[in-house]
């Protein structure tokens, strides 16, 4: 972990390096620029020590000084001679718990099958004993689909994985290689995969309370013809836009919405927060300015959280029926330093997307839109399982996926054409 005192010293030195970073009002009173560059804080001597009116000092000043006080103390030591300060700045180094990381990576493949089997094992086939040709259980189909996406192999090359799973009795039949493609092309399984995404995140409900919302594109293997027809340009890949709500501590994905490349960010926010609140207690939600709206701030407050969403340049503090919007606007204007400390958690969403793309690829192999959406959901389920494995090893807790009773009821009500033959 980064030493907090060294990090605070680094920030204080950066303030000193700025032109007019510290303005002396008198020998006992100074104006110190905010680290973000927006506004200043007053640091003065009260006869015993330096005090500051910044939120950090008000909250923690009785324990340790804030970076603005540290900057003034440095200013007193070196005066205005800050030519060599930059050489003394301590680099921020984020350490890695390599023993835990190595253990998780070594065990991941074996544990992945076990966790995946536990996740889908209660999905029953209501027609498995009926007349006619035997069919592949839906739980087996989903197991093989997610395993295939996790492996990043083609349907044919992944055939040996199904055989190994069959020998371990994790599936009841070893399917044909093209049975998985048939399953991915079924729109009926999309709602079930969405439920599995949320279910796969539930083991970490006791850890996560702060979340970030963002979107990113995943390239399809198919091309859009519109650009070449309308604009005479070369062929351009189609894209799926994936909107996620992710925990900022473990980077688990609590919910996902998938749209085409033109899907608006702000419109997906309410659904992401609503579904996340079903399984998690929400304390903070951070998102970029694309999600800035009165409705989005209100929905976070409805579920007991605080939204840290920056305001667009043309935004005003007029209520228009939302006092919460006005309060948030003034907080954003008057306490930007404190606001940005919370808002910075939004970068975890980008880390989540980066991890998915590096581990499972940023290109979808499926050819049609239904299969592409289902493949993307399988990627996210596979990613969530790897996160749970990592956290299980790090914290040493027993991960039990919650009951799938509600999911079983919906599956049983589905028509028998959800199932493919062996």
Image (spheres, helix red, strand yellow):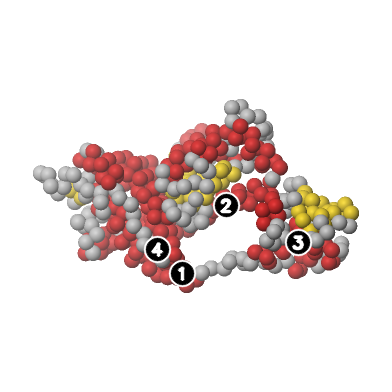
Mark number displayed over residue 100: 1
Q: Residue at x 52, y 47 (%)?
A: 283
Q: On the image, numbered disc 3 is attached to which residue?
A: 70
Q: Residue at x 44, y 48 (%)?
A: 280
Q: Which sits earlier in the primary sequence, circle 4 or circle 3?
A: 3
Q: Residue 93: x percent and y percent?
A: 62, 67
Q: On the image, numbered disc 2 is attached to which residue?
A: 345
For the N terminus, the quadrant is: bottom right
In the rendered image, the vertical position of residue 19 relative to residue 333, given as above or below: below
In whole angstroms, how far apart are the C-alphas of marks 2 and 1? 23 Å
In whole angstroms, how far apart are the C-alphas of marks 4 and 3? 41 Å
Q: Which sits earlier in the primary sequence, circle 2 or circle 3?
A: 3
Q: Nearer the viewer, mark 3 or mark 1?
A: 3
Q: On the image, numbered disc 4 is attached to which residue?
A: 397
Q: Which sits earlier in the primary sequence, circle 3 or circle 1?
A: 3
Q: Are marks 1 and 4 in contact (CB under 8 Å)?
A: no
Q: Nearer the viewer, mark 2 or mark 3?
A: 3
Foreground pick, 324 / 265 = 324
- Which structural element holds mark 1? helix
Q: Are marks 3 and 1 in contact (CB under 8 Å)?
A: no
Q: Are marks 2 and 1 in contact (CB under 8 Å)?
A: no
In whole angstroms, how far apart are the C-alphas of marks 4 and 2? 25 Å
**Label 1 packing within 10 angstroms: few (<14), some (14-19), many (20+):** some
Q: Which sits earlier in the primary sequence, circle 1 or circle 4?
A: 1
In whole angstroms, how far apart are the C-alphas of marks 3 and 1? 36 Å
- Which structural element holds mark 3? helix
In whole angstroms, how far apart are the C-alphas of marks 2 and 3? 25 Å
Return the residue found at the far bottom: 99
In the rendered image, the vertical position of residue 287 relative to residue 65, given as above or below: above
Q: Which sits earlier in the primary sequence, circle 2 or circle 1?
A: 1
Q: Residue 215: x percent and y percent?
A: 51, 45
- Which structural element holds mark 4? loop
């Amino acid at each position: 972990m980064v030493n907090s005192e060294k990090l605070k010293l680094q920030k204080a030195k950066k303030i000193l390096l700025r032109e007019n970073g510290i303005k002396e009002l008198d020998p006992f009173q100074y104006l110190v620029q905010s680290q973000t560059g927006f506004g200043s804080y007053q640091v003065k001597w009260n006869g015993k020590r330096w005090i500051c009116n910044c939120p950090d000092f008000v909250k923690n000043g009785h324990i340790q000084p804030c970076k603005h006080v540290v900057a003034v103390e440095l200013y007193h030591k070196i005066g205005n001679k800050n030519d060599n300060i930059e050489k003394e700045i301590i680099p921020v180094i984020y350490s890695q718990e390599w023993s835990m990381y190595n253990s998780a990576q070594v065990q991941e493949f074996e544990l992945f099958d076990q966790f995946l089997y536990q996740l889908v094992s209660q999905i029953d086939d209501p027609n498995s004993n009926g007349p006619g040709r035997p069919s592949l259980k839906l739980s087996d189909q989903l197991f093989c689909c997610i395993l295939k996406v996790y492996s990043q192999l083609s349907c044919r090359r992944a055939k040996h994985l199904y055989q190994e799973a069959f020998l371990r009795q994790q599936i009841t039949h070893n399917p044909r290689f093209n049975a998985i493609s048939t399953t991915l092309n079924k729109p009926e399984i999309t709602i079930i995969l969405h439920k599995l995404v949320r279910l796969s995140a539930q083991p970490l409900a006791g850890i996560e309370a702060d979340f970030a919302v963002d979107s990113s594109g995943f390239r399809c293997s198919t091309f859009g013809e519109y650009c070449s027809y309308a604009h005479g340009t070369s062929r351009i890949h189609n894209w799926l836009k994936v909107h996620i709500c992710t925990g900022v501590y473990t980077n688990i994905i609590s919910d996902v919405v998938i749209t085409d490349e033109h899907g608006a960010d702000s419109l997906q926010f309410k659904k992401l927060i609503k579904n996340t609140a079903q399984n998690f207690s929400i304390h903070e939600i951070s998102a970029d300015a694309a999600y800035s709206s009165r409705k989005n701030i209100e929905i976070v407050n409805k579920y007991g959280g605080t939204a840290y969403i920056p305001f667009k340049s043309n935004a005003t503090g007029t209520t228009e029926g939302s006092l919460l919007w006005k309060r948030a606007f003034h907080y954003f204007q008057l306490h930007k330093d404190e606001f940005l400390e919370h808002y910075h958690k939004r970068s975890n969403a980008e880390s989540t997307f980066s991890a998915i793309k590096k581990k499972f690829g940023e290109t979808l192999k499926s050819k049609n839109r239904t299969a592409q959406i289902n493949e993307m959901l399988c990627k996210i389920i596979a990613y969530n399982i790897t996160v749970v494995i990592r956290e299980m090893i790090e914290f040493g807790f027993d991960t039990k996926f919650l009951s799938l009773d509600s999911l079983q009821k919906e599956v049983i009500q589905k028509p028998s054409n959800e199932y493919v033959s062996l």
